[in-house]
Image (tube, coloured by chain):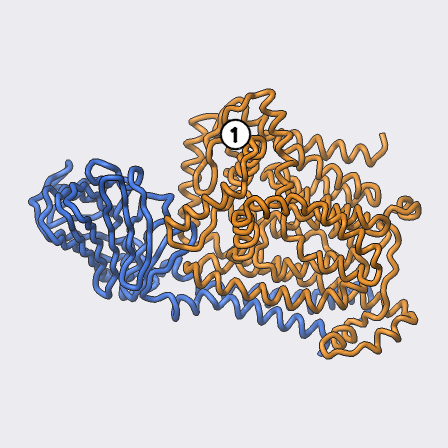
Chain colours: A orange, B blue
Amino acid sequence: MEERSRIVLLAVAVRFAIAPFFMHAGDVGTIYESSIMALKGANIYDYVYVKTLQLQNTTGLPIFFEGYAYHPLLVYFFAPFYWLFTLIAGPSPVMIDGHYPSLPILIYPWTPLLLLMLKIPIILADAFVVYLLAGMDTGKAKIYAFCPYVVFISIVWGMFDALVAVFLLASYLASSRNNLLSGIFYGLSMLKLYTVVLLPLYLVRLLGRWRALLEFLGGFALTLVPLGYFLIVSPNSIWNVLVTFQGTRLMGGVNLYNFVWIVQDLPFDLQISMIPNILLLAALVFLIPTFGRKAPLLKAIVAVMFVYFLFGKVINEQFLVSIFPLILLCRECDHRLWVAPFIFIFLRSPFYYFALPILWTSPIFYSYYLQADFVWRQLQAAGYLMIPMYAVGVAFSLAIFWNLLRILESTRAAVTLLPGPAAVGSRSMTGGLTRLIRSELSLREPFHVRPAFSSESRQRNTPSQR
Amino acid sequence: MKLKSKLTAFFAVYIIALSFVPLVHDTLLSQARWVGYGTGAYEYQNQHYFVLFNDPYDGSSKPHIHVNPDFAPAARISLLEFSDWTSWVNDHNLFNEFNATVRANPQALDVTYTRPEIAIHKFVEVSSDSVKVTLTSDEEFRAHLEIWRWVMTSINGISTKDAPKPLAIEPTRLIEFMFEEERLQSLGRGTIALSALPVETKIWPHEKGFNKITIDFVNSEMSFTVSGSMEAAGTPSATWSYALLPYVLPVVAISVVALYLLVDKYGRTLKDRATGRSS
């Protein structure tokens, strides 16, 4: 058996062995109840919107029910596997409630099977990423396949950023040979909406190549059809869930902004959460037309996503998975970035929380859970956990910043080594800050991007852009 | 100055500046008003009292009144906790059997409990010397309220030695209790002034003192004005409190940024030396 297949199979085997026994109750619960609603033909966004209105009426505060707030297509990756599950176990509820702060009631013996089935799309996404990486560099593929952070997020947590990762990687790889496909894959990467920051980058790079641009937009538009449908049938619901909720979320996560968690004043917190938004916009406006347009696509994507990680107001523990394959391919990036969000997981959520499917099998384990949770809540209430959480958040932001600078610097170094006629042309560009950035970073020449799937690239161990 | 240095300087200042936001908020903006946060909780902080009104998922701390001792202003010492879990109106549990909505205005937190046959308002008002919790309705209602503290060493002069079992005390409009705070090595005293005479007041012993007072009354309005104070007895040891976090985060930010700058500068130099390159 060739090594590539062996790595993929081993990665899948590890994931199948772990999947039935762990979960993040809130997130897996969301996928579970969304799958049920999708099979019944119910409107998921209406459900979330009604819950939000109830919550806001109860509390008098602009807070949102944290349910299904993703691209409409996402649930259709999971619903078929839930349907298969019901063929075996029947339609009776298996996971009852579980939205924060409630704990779920789990029904046995079906819970492990349900978890396995709902995680199959994530396992497949991981397998595809490993397969694609192994085609370029088996070492990188092994890192992704067995990285504790990736395994934890995908299989222990049950979060589906691996789907974003596989589509983003596929979009990047397809970009040099098929723009339609690249557009479709990019659109699918927006299953979680944060990759929207890459849209201007893709568009700016295709400016002037009108046919390619049209193909890309055509592919991208295909993935937006379900969004259009929901905008017609329930505009208020989908707007509230996808735009209002995502747009007015409180900042925080594995970043320098999680200090806001100790500022217990929601209106104030929402106002101050606009600061990173402004900086994100400013950074993208400057970075994309200058560096983003000229640098190799891989570096440009990673750089823009790093900017998002620095100034995006919500960076959850799992987000790094989405760009982890690209980080592995980027020579200038340090893939050990995963350590910070991995540590953060255990500071924010008690480790035993992920083991509910095991702990709920016995009243004795359940009593252990309550004892451990009592201690955990005391640590939390005293604020002891907030200090390391903030330190890790700041450290992660700085690590991202350092990697971003390396990408920008390496591009300058590469161009200095390879001056070309275009360098002269770029010097003639005018414009205050644009010129400053260009001159400081010496971005003088467009990089020549080789097709990712060319015969040459297939024979190499490293991706074509490196 | 190179662009990299400028960006690094900007980002370092940005991190450190933002780390002061909680401190600025706590000292300048959050004092003496109800602020909502999280999944629907509210809190109020003034010079003497910190009052938490818990989110709609939790029936405890409705409200939970803390006192800030003069000799340790950042410490929040639990004074009394009203529990909806264990309180009933007309034989219906306040947490499980009423719909509750919360609204904050500058004067009070207004919690409305509704059932088809009755609507009751719970107002929580905080002043510099007391916290007033008022239950009011358009019609008369029968209530059983439980007020908790772990633990009160004595209530109206009665200790657990005198009352090893739950004891109904003489109905009174003034309840005085004492408590000890081990961490601060201090003694505290609190009072609950009732606006009307209750039907029954019971005190409930626990291991080292009384842990709850139950009050039954029939009325269309009843208010409980709670006040508390603490005095140091002995030398309080330095204690940690959640309220100190705003002071700690800037220190954390400065430390992590300083570490980054050191590693960025000297780490690279050492690496360059190792590889034989000039920095």
Q: How packed is label 1: few (under 14 Cα within 10 Å), some, or many (20 or more)?
A: some
Q: How many marks?
A: 1
For disc 1, the chain is: A
What residue lies at 52% left-to-right and 67% top-to-bottom?
B18
Question: Residue A137 falls in which quadrant of the image?
Answer: top right
Q: Furthest residue to the left?
A: B170
Q: Name the residue nearer the viewer: B165 or B201.
A: B201
What residue lies at 26% left-to-right and 49% top-to-bottom?
B81
Question: Residue A264 falls in which quadrant of the image?
Answer: bottom left
Residue B183 in view of the camera: yes
Which residue has dot 1 on it?
A358
Residue A149 in view of the camera: no
Q: Secondary structure at mark 1?
A: helix
Determine whether A271 is above or below A126 in the image.
Answer: below
Q: Name the residue nearer the viewer: B192 or A294.
A: A294
Left or right, B242 with reference to B159: right
Task: Residue A75: give x, y in percent of width and height.
Answer: 61, 38
